[in-house]
Amino acid sequence: MNTNPLIPITPGPGLLLVLSAPSGAGKTTLAHRLTQEFQHANFSVSYTTREPRGPEQNGKDYHFVDPRLFLQMVNRGDFIEWAEVHDNFYGTARRSIDRVIASRGIAVFDIDVKGGLKIKSRFPDAVLVFILPPSMDELERRLRGRGTDKDETIHRRLLAARTEIEKGSESYDYLIINDALDRAFDELRAIVIAEQARRGRVDLSLLNLQPPDFSPETRSDEK
Ligand code: ADP
Ligand code: 5GP
């Protein structure tokens, strides 16, 4: 649902927006807010072999598949990128990208840094945004507060967080510190609005830029 009718739909070519972050930094929260506020923003639903967490729904949050099916998809070349993250497989299907490009909307990807860089190498206009926690202590508090992961999983995710932060802050286009959610979302909204106004993304076809026809046959005021 679009809760803010003032945010216009994007008329020009689509925007591929990749959000990455160490687990627990808040990218899923920000991505959902974005798809609620912007008409034409769609979440790219990845495939994963991990178990659903909390209220997650198949087909909405992820396509949950078993490792055998995932491997078949890899062998068929169904993924534009895939990776093993925290001992599970995750992948972005070619089909989801094609669909969003065709709709000319905003495609929001919640994927890791390696996946984001792969998307950028295939689609150089993709915009990469990295979400940072305000501190490592707060990251741990959020992971625990989410109440969906076992202690061992939380430890693994905290260990991986440092490497992900190093890679993301070196290579991404934008960095957002998710301290207060509203403030962080203001930054994300500003990035999306600015990127939509980039030359090449604005649809000029409605301007009707053809020069006016002044030929004598078409002028009624000629004597
Ligand atoms: P990620 O998708 O990056 O793993 P989530 O969006 O699931 O992270 O957020 C992790 C937890 O932190 C959730 O419980 C979420 O409600 C909470 N959270 C997200 N952003 C903030 C924030 N700015 N301040 C406090 N808690 C937050
Ligand atoms: P989670 O299990 O917390 O949902 O996700 C774990 C990590 O996998 C996150 O960093 C998330 O962004 C990443 N991820 C989710 N889907 C994909 C995907 O399709 N490709 C890649 N490369 N990473 C993904």
Image (cartoon, grey):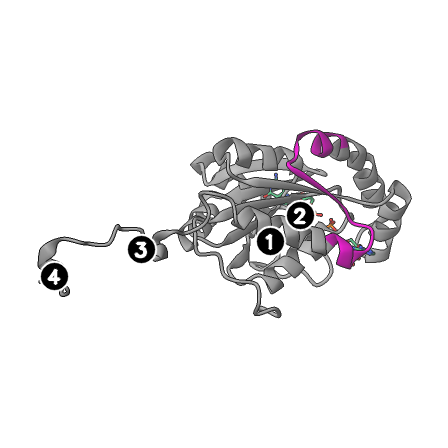
Residue 64 in view in this figure: no
Mark 4 or mark 1, whichever is nearer to me: 4
The stretch drawn in magenta includes residue 167: yes
Position of residue 203 relative to residue 128, above or below, is below
The residue sitting at 73% across, 60% down in the picture is: 54
Could you tell me which secondary element the residue under label 3 belongs to?
loop
Which circle's residue, 2 or 4, is located before the other in the chain?
Answer: 2
Which amino acid type is shown beneath numbered disc 2? Arg
Which circle's residue, 4 or 3, is located before the other in the chain?
Answer: 3
At which x and y percent is residue 125? 51, 38
Mark 4 or mark 3, whichever is nearer to me: 4
Mark 2 or mark 4, whichever is nearer to me: 4
Residue underneath mark 3:
208
Which amino acid type is shown beneath numbered disc 3? Asn
Quarter placement of the C terminus? bottom left
Crowdedness of circle 4 by 10 Å Cα count: few (<14), some, many (20+)?
Answer: few
Pointer 1 residue Cβ closer than 8 Å to ligand 2? yes
Crowdedness of circle 1 by 10 Å Cα count: few (<14), some, many (20+)?
Answer: many
Position of residue 9 relative to residue 202, above or below, is below
Q: Any mark on residue 50, and which?
A: 2
220 or 189: which is nearer to us?
A: 220
Pointer 2 residue Cβ closer than 8 Å to ligand 2? yes
Q: Which residues are magenta?
A: 166-184
Which circle's residue, 4 or 1, is located before the other in the chain?
Answer: 1
Q: Determine the CA span between mark 2 and mark 4.
A: 76 Å
Could you tell me which secondary element the residue under label 2 belongs to?
loop
The residue sitting at 77% across, 55% down in the picture is: 183
Residue 38 in view in this figure: yes
Residue underneath mark 4:
222
Residue underneath mark 1:
62
Q: Determine the CA span between mark 1 and mark 3.
A: 42 Å
